[in-house]
Image (cartoon, rainbow, N blue to C red):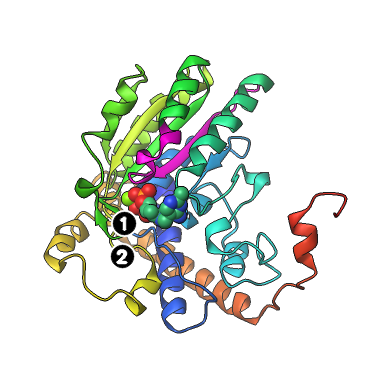
Amino acid sequence: MLAMYRTMLLIRRTEEQLRDDFHAGRLPGGVHLYIGQEAIAAGVCAHLDDADPIASTHRGHGHYLAKGGDPEAMLAEVYARETGICKGMGGSMHVADFSRGIIGANGIVGAGLAISAGAAFAAQLDREGRVAVCFFGDGAANQGVFMEVLNVATLWKLPLLLVCEHNCYSEFSPSDTVTAGEITDRARAFNIPCSVVDGNDAVAVWQAAAAAVELARDGGGPSFIEAKTYRIYGHNESEVHWLSSEYRDETEIEPWRKQDPIERLGSFILENGVCARENLDALDIEIRARIAAAAEAAAAAPPPDPELMRDMMFSGQQP
Ligand SMILES: Cc1ncc(C[n+]2csc(CCOP(=O)(O)OP(=O)(O)O)c2C)c(N)n1
Ligand SMILES: [Mg+2]
């Protein structure tokens, strides 16, 4: 529980730093914040190790950090610096670290579904017990590739866990205006084991993922988890500069703030006597200091050499 709490706090403080840095004009581009959804990445990745591949989304900082990605290198990447995890050539939507099984955040909505199915197929061929996980949004579940992946993963019994983070929005569209029926029913049609969990409850996510990952490791095939949550911030922090009107009301957001996943896990930890409030506070101070220092280091680092673009685009021979 403490490990999950630490992960969630690390994600939250990193994202708050990026939010502030964006609005201070310190970042070269906008950021999609994961704030409010931290329990999902933390609860699922607690069951994975470096060899297990995860595919992520445009909202990918939380998945990267939960999977053990280096925070300093991620901040430098979002700052587009040569010290970044992708040498500053990828940016916020392409944070990746293959050595940690982070096979990439992705700006193409739904692309992670097919990529993770491929990784699961490779894992099956290698027979080393690896499990692939795909994090994707409710909007991505409306892409045709979702059906293709459900089909082939079931048919081939791929070691794949599909985690749909239903955060009530696709960009500026409330989900109920673009998504028909229950997303879980789409997976149920393939007889895939399904669970719907409170995505703001880290323990519930952890439990659902435990069963799904174990099943996949034992050769039992794919599972589907729909985690119900809410996107506390905008679609992208840049939107305040170009959206002409408000698209949601503060009264809608407020009840979800009261369901804050970090506060909920913190209360659970204290109620169960895992540690004292001072320990949680000390952890927060430590993480805040680390992230503030990481942002300063990122800001001070040089940009990448443009020549790198060739090496990063083409493997081996250049055309
Ligand atoms: C193939 C494709 N279509 C459209 C877009 C534009 N777009 C970016 S994010 C997004 C909404 C995604 O919603 P969801 O999958 O629910 O993820 P969330 O942003 O809520 O985390 C859209 C339509 C895109 N990036 N890629
Ligand atoms: Mg969404």
User: Quick one: label 2 or label 1, which is nearer the N terminus?
Assistant: 1
Q: Which mark is residue 233?
A: 2
Q: Which mark is residue 234?
A: none
Residue at disc 1, CB closer than 8 Å to ligand 1: no
Residue 95, visible in the rendered structure: yes
Which contiguous range is marked in magenta?
128-146
Residue type at mark 2? Tyr
Q: Residue at x 58, y 64 (%)?
A: 91
Q: Nearer the viewer, residue 33 or 306?
A: 306
Q: Nearer the viewer, residue 120 or 3?
A: 120
Neighbourhood count class around disc 1 (C-alpha, 10 Å): few under 14, some 14–19, many 20 upward: many
Question: Which residue is under mark 1?
Answer: 36
Q: Quadrant of the C terminus?
A: bottom right
Q: Residue 185: percent from the left, percent from the top?
A: 26, 27
Q: Are marks 2 and 1 in contact (CB under 8 Å)?
A: yes
Residue type at mark 1? Gly
In the drawing, does residue 76 fall left or right of residue 226?
right
Q: Residue at x 64, y 27 (%)?
A: 122
**Alpha carbon of mark 2 to alpha carbon of mark 1: how far?**
8 Å
Q: Quadrant of residue 124?
A: top right
